Image (cartoon, rainbow, N blue to C red):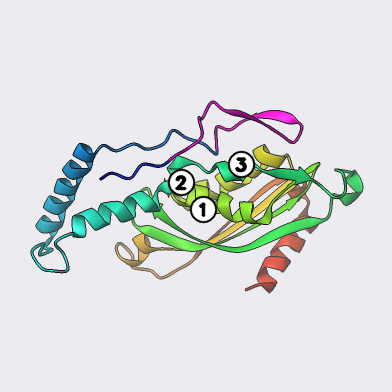
Amino acid sequence: MAKRSQAVDPTNVIELAGASLPAVRAHLAPRDISDQDWQRYEGYVEEIFGALGLDLDTPGTLNTPERFLRALFDATSGYDGDDKLLTAFPAENGGHADGIASQIIEGPVSFVCLCEHHALPFYGTAHIGYIAGEQIIGISKLTRLVRLYARRFTVQERLGEQIADTLVDLISPRGVAVHIEASHLCTQMRGVEEHSRTVTTFWRGAFEDAELRREFLDEIRSRA
């Protein structure tokens, strides 16, 4: 039986940070796969795995096509959105400018993604920092934000951009910093077969300031 997820109507508009915010980035239409389609997809997977050499008649592999599809569906659950992201609280400083240099940093947040180029995993950690405006977001919501976009077919560069831009949309902070470090199985299992790690950083607003960037990077290095 196909698994169905619930998601909030993408046209829903919520009140957050004192303004109406269309919940477009966080919410998408729920995926709905019929039982008939699911069985058809299992047949495709069985045919492909068999052609690649997998013996599908052993006790350990009889249900492998179904398990593979279930795992793939779960690994891409970010397409169903996350309505629990839509919670914010008043900042302690009331959004005053004299609190502009006070950073909130969360991480490392672990994640696993599927690369959209080869559908192979890349995995690593993300750190998120922000300088609050009038609103703050619950600490657990920063982890949810990473997982929302990590559980999709994506690339590392887009993952960081989406995390940074959605945090801006959710609470209008004075600045956002995102640091991602990941290993890519598409380079380890094929091609150059290189076991390397890729680092990407993303800056918004007040983090254009070099001193704030240094403070953020020094803090996440101290957690390594």
Among the two numbered marks 1 and 3 on one chain, the one whose residue lies closer to the N terminus: 1
Q: Residue 182 at x, y = what percent?
A: 49, 62
Asked whether disc 1 touches disc 2, contact meaning CB atoms under 8 Å apart, the reply is yes
Label 3 environment density (alpha carbons within 10 Å; few <14, some 14–19, many ≥20): some
Magenta-highlighted residues: 6-25
- Quadrant (top left, top right, bottom left, bottom right) of the C terminus: bottom right
Q: Amino acid at mark 2?
A: Gly
Mark 3 or mark 2: whose residue is earlier in sequence? 2
Nearest the camera: 29 or 124?
29
Mark 3 residue type: Thr
Residue 174 in sight from this viewpoint: no
Residue at image position (10%, 56%) is: 51
Q: Separation of disc 3 and disc 2 at Cα?
A: 14 Å
Which amino acid type is marked by label 1? Answer: Arg
The residue sitting at the right extreme is: 98
Left or right placement of residue 30 versus residue 204 in this view: left
Q: Is residue 78 left or right of 56 when viewed as pictured?
A: right
Which of the 4 image quadrants contains residue 109? bottom right
Q: Which residue is mark 2?
A: 78
State the mark number for residue 147.
1
In the rendered view, tell whether residue 26 sits above or below residue 144: above
Q: Can you identify the residue that label 3 sits on?
A: 166
Dots 3 and 2: beta carbons under 8 Å?
no
Q: Position of residue 50 (x, y in %)?
A: 11, 57
Label 2: few (<14), some or many (≥20) within 10 Å? many
Distance of label 1 from label 2 (alpha carbons): 7 Å
Q: Which mark is residue 17?
A: none
